[in-house]
Structure formats: C-alpha cells, structure tokens
Amino acid sequence: MKRSFGLIALLASLVGCGSDAPPLPELGLVKGKVTLDGKPVPNASIIFTPMDPGLRSFGRTDESGQYELTYQQGHKGAAVGPHTVRIRTGGEVADADGNIVSESPEIIPERYHGQMALSKMVEPGENPINFDLTSK
C-alpha cells in the first residue's frame, strides 16, 4: 500500500509540470510552388525567418516544385507575421545519421537567398505563396 501511495504521489507531482519549450505562436499554413523561368524547381530548400523574434520554418520542394512549410516538432506552417524568405538548391545533403552524402549545385540566383532575400507576410489560416523566380 505504501508503495502504491508513493507512486501515486510521484505521478501527481509530475502532473502539471510542463516542458521548458516556449508555447507555439499562432501559425499560418503555408504552401505553394517554386518555379524558375516558368519551370518547376525540384529539391529546393525554402526558409521563412520571422522578422520578429521567433523560430524559422522550413520546406523542400518536390519534383513538381510544390512545398509545404513545417514550423517545429511536426507542426505545419509558419509564425504569423512578416518573414524574410530564402530559396536555394545548392549545398550539402546529409543522410538521417548526419553524414554528408552529396553536394548539389546551386541553380537559384543569389538574389533569392543572399543578403537581399525575399519578404512575405504570413496571415492566420491558409497562405498559398508561390515563387515565380527568374534567372535574369
């Protein structure tokens, strides 16, 4: 009986103990398509960085250039508010263990991922955001 009471007391003391993770901000669902000179861009990384303090959201395009952003811990979307956006295809590719398995060439002009990144506003709800990029 004492053992059961001790276990119940321990469990009761843990209830209500939250994690140290900050609460999720309001998120807007963001998805769209990336094209370069009218053609879909496969395997591009898209990074939305909030202009206000907060965590980034990431996405990767599929073979048809379609992407969907993920905030953190599997939550879809990006924090509501203004963001800088960077899109690129080049860089190192790692496997699930973190080993570099290949390096892909950059086909996206630097203006879309350098210091002069794009900017977009994320609103509550669904945000279809397409990027029609040009090489010139």
Image (cartoon, rainbow, N blue to C red):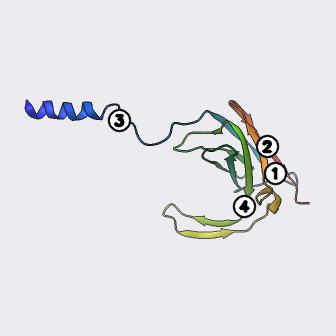
Give the camera-side residue of 1 and 23. 23
Residue 116, image x, y percentages: 81, 56
Residue 101, image x, y percentages: 58, 69
Asked whether the beta carbons under mark 2 and mark 1 sit within 8 Å of each other, the answer is: yes
Q: Say what secondary structure mark 1 lies in.
A: strand
User: Of circles 4 and 3, which is in front?
Assistant: 3
Residue beneath disc 3: 17
Mark 2 or 1, nearer chain start:
1
Residue 117, image x, y percentages: 78, 54
Residue 19 position (above or below residue 38): above
Marks 4 and 2, how far apart at CA: 16 Å
* Amino acid bearing label 1: Thr
Residue beneath disc 2: 130
Residue at horizontal 14 percent and vertical 30 percent from the top: 5
Mark 2 or 3, nearer chain start:
3
* 93 horizontally vs 132: left or right: left
User: Of circles 3 and 1, which is in front?
Assistant: 3
Q: Which mark is residue 118?
A: none
Marks 4 and 3, how far apart at CA: 42 Å
Mark 4 or 3, nearer chain start:
3
Mark 4 or 2, nearer chain start:
4
Residue beneath disc 4: 89
Residue beneath disc 1: 35
* 122 horizontally vs 14: left or right: right
Marks 2 and 3, how far apart at CA: 42 Å
